[in-house]
Image (spheres, grey):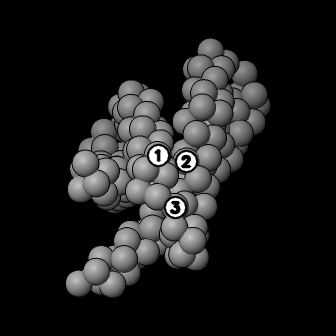
């Protein structure tokens, strides 16, 4: 059972970091490089709910398995758990707050005919998108940090 918990912990973190890396550096550039802007936005809009759901599930699994593994009084382990909590909080914020806000702005933008209002909505969307990108980058950096801590743990076992 102990091996399964450790395996699940590592798998959750690797899937989470891998998902962010793949989407950010492969999928999004391919989508936006191939399709027009409107269609790209629609495709990414379909992907994002699943993207954030996977991140949330992985975050919950990573944190939950940390506690099943037994939170040692080792400072490295405590730092890792704090980073996982922050990553989960950022993913929840992006998925449950930023994504719906961006969708709302997009819907309003497509229903608006007045050009000045469209300019304001585009600016608002750009700001919301920037926040989303920043949160994504922070989660990725946190995930890479957690993987570093895990590598240190594996190294100490070998």
Q: CA distance from mark 1 to mark 3?
A: 11 Å
Q: CA distance from mark 2 to mark 3?
A: 18 Å
Where is residue 129? Give x, y as percent: 59, 45
Mark 2 and mark 1 lie on one chain; the one further toward the N terminus is 1
Where residue 51 appears, x then y in whole percent?
40, 38
Callout 1 secondary element: helix
- Of 96 and 70, nearer the camera is 70
Res. 18 in view: no
Give the SS element for disc 3.
loop
Tag 2 residue: 88
Instruction: Say if 101 sits above or below 136 in the image.
Output: above
Residue 2 placement (x, y as % from top left): 28, 54
Q: Could you tell whether 21 is left or right of 87 in the image?
A: left
Towards the viewer: 114 or 96 = 96
Q: Is residue 114 above or below residue 129?
A: above
Give whichever of discs 1 and 3 has the lower sequence position.
1
Q: Which mark is residue 146?
A: none
Q: Is residue 85 left or right of residue 113?
A: left
Vertical arrangement, residue 152 with respect to residue 14, above or below: below
User: Which quarter of the image is occupied by the C terminus?
Assistant: bottom left
Residue in the picture at 49% in, 52% down? 67
What residue do we see at 68% from left, 47% from top? 127
| Label 2–label 1 contact, CB within 8 A | no
Q: Is residue 81 left or right of residue 23?
A: right
To which residue does mark 1 refer? 64
Residue 71: mark in rendering: 3
**Residue at horizontal 46 percent and vertical 46 percent from the top:** 64
| Element class at badge 2 | helix
Q: Is residue 120 above or below residue 147?
A: above
Q: Earlier in the sequence, mark 2 or mark 3?
A: 3
Find residue 104 and report its image quarter. Answer: top right
- Looking at the image, which is closer to me, 18 or 65? 65
């Amino acid at each position: 059972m102990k091996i399964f918990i450790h395996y699940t912990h590592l798998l959750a973190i690797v899937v989470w970091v891998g998902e962010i890396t793949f989407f950010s550096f492969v999928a999004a550039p391919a989508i936006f490089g191939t399709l027009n802007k409107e269609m790209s936005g629609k495709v990414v809009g379909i992907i994002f709910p699943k993207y954030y759901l996977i991140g949330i599930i992985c975050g919950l699994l990573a944190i939950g398995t940390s506690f099943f593994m037994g939170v040692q009084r080792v400072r490295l382990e405590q730092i890792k758990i704090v980073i996982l909590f922050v990553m989960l909080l950022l993913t929840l914020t992006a998925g449950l707050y930023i994504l719906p806000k961006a969708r709302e702005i997009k819907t309003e933008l497509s229903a608006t005919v007045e050009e000045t209002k469209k300019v304001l909505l585009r600016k608002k969307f750009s700001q919301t998108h920037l926040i989303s990108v920043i949160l994504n980058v922070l989660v990725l950096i946190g995930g890479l940090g957690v993987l570093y801590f895990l590598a240190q743990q594996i190294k100490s076992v070998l």
